[in-house]
């Protein structure tokens, strides 16, 4: 009699456990839950991307400081150094373009020559 009671209780417990697991999995697979999971992953990816961009920017600032120090471009002497004005390139200057015109040669084509 105790044996039957034990197995009945064990079977009922296993059924409750399995039902609970299946219901949890079904709730995870609903469209609302999937959308929430996707939104959470997107937000997490955005935070990681922002952290990466901040790390890159910090590295850029550090490297620029190292290069400025190595090249002697520090403004520690009290003078602010400015970049020279940009040079104009002749290819971009409309007045520097050549005024020659090109003529396209005309080629006569006779279809009867193919036969």
Image: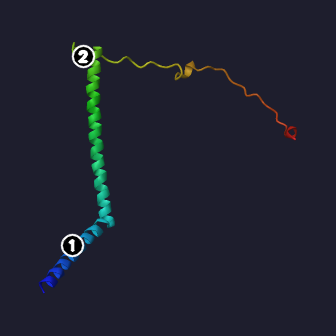
Q: CA distance from mark 2 to mark 1?
A: 71 Å
Quarter holding the N terminus is bottom left
Q: Residue at x 49, y 20 (%)?
A: 89
State the image quarter where residue 35 is shown.
Answer: bottom left
The residue closer to the viewer here, 93 or 23, is 23
Q: Is residue 35 above or below residue 95?
A: below
Along the polypeptide, which appears first: circle 2 or circle 1? 1
Badge 2 element? loop
Quarter holding the C terminus is top right
Q: Which residue is mark 1?
A: 17
Residue 55: x percent and y percent? Answer: 26, 35
Residue 74: x percent and y percent? Answer: 25, 17
Q: Is residue 37 above or below residue 72?
A: below
Q: Residue furthest left?
A: 2
Residue 22: x percent and y percent? Answer: 27, 71
State the image quarter where residue 95 is shown.
Answer: top right
Answer whether residue 73 is visible to the viewer in this image: no
Instruction: Report the colour scheme.
Output: rainbow
Q: Residue at x 29, y 63 (%)?
A: 33
Left or right: residue 95 versus residue 107 is: left
2 or 1: mark nearer the eye: 1
Residue 13: x percent and y percent? Answer: 18, 76
Q: Which residue is mark 2?
A: 75
Badge 1 element? helix
């Amino acid at each position: 009699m105790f044996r039957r009671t034990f197995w009945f209780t064990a079977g009922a417990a296993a059924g409750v456990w399995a039902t609970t697991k299946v219901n949890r999995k079904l709730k995870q697979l609903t469209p609302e839950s999937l959308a929430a999971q996707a939104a959470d992953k997107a937000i997490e990816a955005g935070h990681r991307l922002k952290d990466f961009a901040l790390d890159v920017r910090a590295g850029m600032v550090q490297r620029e400081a190292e290069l400025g120090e190595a090249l002697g471009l520090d403004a520690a002497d009290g003078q602010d150094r400015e970049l020279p004005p940009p040079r104009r390139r002749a290819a971009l200057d409309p007045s520097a373009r050549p005024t020659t015109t090109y003529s396209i040669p005309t080629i006569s084509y006779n279809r009867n020559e193919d036969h």
